[in-house]
Amino acid sequence: MDHMMFMQKTKSDKRAKYIEEHENVWPDCLKAHRDSGIEREIIWIDGDNLYIYMMGKDLDKALNKLKRVPVFKDWIEEMKPLMDIRQDFSEDGQMKKFEKVFDLEEQLKNLKE
């Protein structure tokens, strides 16, 4: 299973709108995420900073599939005015992922008791 975390940032005056939009994500956009292979996505917010966690069997493949789906492209366009820093979900875009330094589950599997 792949795990990924990355950061984005809302514009200070658009934080509430960003939260509101994510309380009612378009059903077709939710289905596109599911159909791409993303099994889990969680967004945390701290001030204007967004921390996005994703999980799936092959996230690179899932994201490449997702960013070609018209409804996802439309969602990204809808979110652009709300964002100060955002990941590049364009066809050629590269996401800047956090480097994983610790995974409890992985270490517990390797634990010799």
Image: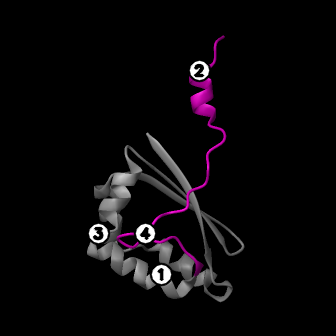
Q: Foreground: 109 or 60? A: 60
Nearer the viewer's eye, disc 4 or disc 2?
4
Judge whether residue 3 is colored magenta.
no
Report how far apart the C-alphas of labels 1 and 2 lie in the structure: 41 Å
Q: Position of residue 20 (x, y in %)?
A: 53, 79
Q: Foreground: 25 or 38? A: 38
Q: Position of residue 51 (x, y in %)?
A: 61, 62
The quadrant where residue 15 appears: bottom right
**Vertical side of 6 occupied by 9: above or below:** below
**Vertical side of 19 occupied by 96: above or below:** above
Inspect the image, locate mark 1, and give the three-letter code of the amino acid beneath it: Met
Circle nearer the N terminus (4, 1): 1
Residue under circle 2?
A: 110
Nearer the viewer's eye, disc 1 or disc 3?
3
Inspect the image, locate mark 4, and give the three-letter code of the amino acid beneath it: Gly
Inspect the image, locate mark 3, and give the three-letter code of the amino acid beneath it: Arg
Q: Relative to 64, is 23 on the left or the right?
A: right
Circle nearer the N terminus (4, 2): 4
Please give the label number shown on residue 68. Answer: 3
Q: Foreground: 99 or 106? A: 99
Q: Position of residue 43 (x, y in %)?
A: 56, 62
